[in-house]
Amino acid sequence: MEGSFDYSRQRLLYVPADLPYPRQPDWPDAAAAEIRTLTKAAGGRALVLTTSYRMMERAAGALAGAPIEVLVPGELPKRQLIAAFSEKETATLVATMGYWEGIDVPGPSLSLVIIDRIPFPRPDDPLLQARREAVAARGGSAFDEVDLPHATVMLAQGSGRLIRNEGDRGVIAILDRRLTAMRYGQRMLRSLPRLLRTSDDHRARRFLEEMSSGRDAMLS
């Protein structure tokens, strides 16, 4: 317990265990369905961060018809889009890599951050490719020394959008089971805020629904 808040019981990291792996063909539809389920449970109030435009469009499409205002890049300039998201307490912003940092929305307008998958860098990034080649030339592992650290920093930045002040509560959902199934995923998890962790979708939804209804949601 720190001050009047019990942070470990007010913030939850949710990594579903039953989704396909991201490279499996049925992952996009399964992830989009999970995004819709979680966002509806939260009553909006969500920031959905995707690693591709295709997944951004799929996620936004999955939310069509839900009683939630969905904001996507292109509708407004970035600054105005973030302002609209901040001002509309039940809106959901679905966005790509350009929104993984620089968003500061404390309070009830943001109680759910969803990250679609581990943000490994593109293989054709010229700067990172030069670093990979330099590492390989000396016999090192480009994955361990370039790709993994880059993805870890990005994951921490995206997850950090939820926790902006002492009173912020909510769920960080990362829809990539490699975080718990792979050894490198465990290393990445240690870079994230120290939160209670679950793979139980019912537990995550219940906590979000309690927050959405105005009840004093606490984890046990």
Image (cartoon, rainbow, N blue to C red):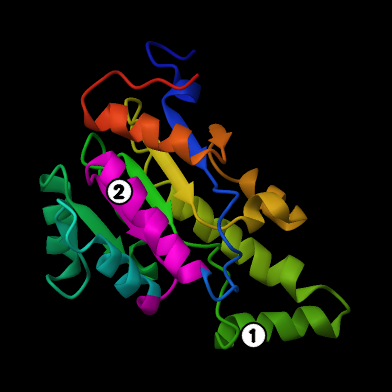
Tell me if mark 1 has few (under 14), some (14-19) or many (20+) residues whose alpha carbon lies within 10 angstroms of its own: some
Q: Can residue 194 be seen in this view?
A: no
Report which quarter residue 141 is drawn in: bottom right
Chain part drawn in magenta? 27-54
Q: Name the residue under label 1.
A: 129
> Which amino acid type corresponds to the residue marked 2 in the rendered image?
Thr
SS assignment for the magenta stretch, majority: helix
Residue 25's place in the image compared with 13, above or below, is below
Residue found farthest to the right? 139
Q: Out of 175 and 74, give the one closest to the viewer.
A: 175
Residue 47 on the magenta span:
yes
Left or right side of 13 for 5: left
Q: Out of 42 and 7, give the one closest to the viewer.
A: 42
Residue 31 on the magenta span:
yes
Report the residue at 68% width, 71% height from top: 146
Q: Is residue 74 visible?
A: yes
| Mark earlier in primary sequence (2, 1) | 2
Residue 32: % across, % down = 39, 63
Q: Mark 2 points at which residue?
A: 39
Residue 41: % across, % down = 30, 41
Residue 203: % across, % down = 46, 32
Left or right side of 193 for 44: left
Report the residue at 41% width, 54% height from top: 34
Residue 29's place in the image compared with 167, above or below, is below
Residue 38's place in the image compared with 208, above or below, is below
